[in-house]
Image (cartoon, rainbow, N blue to C red):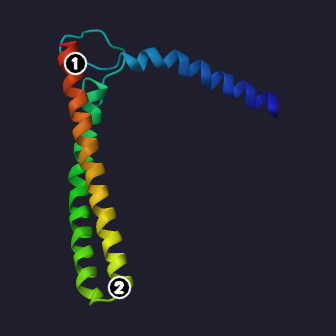
Amino acid sequence: MKRLQRHVLRIVAAMGMYLLPVTASAAQCPGTTNSYVLNPLKYCGIMQFVEAALQLFVILALPVLAFFIVLAGFQFILARGNSTQLEKAKMNFLYVIIGTCLVLGAWLLASLIGATISQITG
């Protein structure tokens, strides 16, 4: 049984090594003519794809973050001076603000890196 698993693993690894150059040359972008596989995406480079994926993530995350900011505000209102509930509301608001900064910071950083790489490569 172990011999069969090793043989299957070797076959899968060999197929992966063979298909890697084929899939790497799959992008059909302006200026390229030879490719073995058609590119199903509309992005020519990995940076364009990552930037678009992060932009989609930000578009989906902003309404969720806005909801949690409103929820933190309701927690402040419903605390009614109770110190433990006020601490929970403050921590919730702090975590929401940190999450917002992380989401927007990742999108900004990816955009800056993508723009820098596109300027360097031309």
Camera-nearest residue between 64 and 20: 64
Label 1 crowd bin: few (<14), some (14–19), many (20+), radius 10 Å: few
Tell me the residue that label 2 is attached to: 83
Q: Is residue 42 visible?
A: no
Left or right, residue 119 beside residue 12: left
Residue at position x 29%, y 86% from top?
79
Image quarter where the N terminus lies is: top right
Residue at position x 21%, y 73% from top?
70
Q: Position of residue 41 (x, y in %)?
A: 27, 31
Left or right, residue 87 beside residue 117: right
Tell me the residue that label 1 is attached to: 29
* Mark pair 2, 1: CA separation: 60 Å
What amino acid type is highlighted by mark number 1? Cys
Q: Which mark is residue 110?
A: none
Q: Position of residue 73 (x, y in %)?
A: 22, 76
What amino acid type is highlighted by mark number 2? Ser
Quadrant of res 85: bottom left
Quadrant of res 34: top left
Q: Does label 2 or label 1 sit earlier along the sequence?
A: 1
Element class at badge 2:
helix
Residue at position x 17%, y 18% from top?
119
Residue at position x 21%, y 65% from top?
66
Camera-nearest residue between 121 and 93: 93
**Number of callouts:** 2
Q: Position of residue 69 (x, y in %)?
A: 23, 69
Which one is in front in this view, the residue at disc 2 or the one at disc 1?
2
Label 2 crowd bin: few (<14), some (14–19), many (20+), radius 10 Å: few
Image quarter where the C terminus lies is: top left
Taking 60 as reference, is 87 above or below it? below
Element class at badge 1:
loop
Taking 27 as reference, is 54 above or below it? below
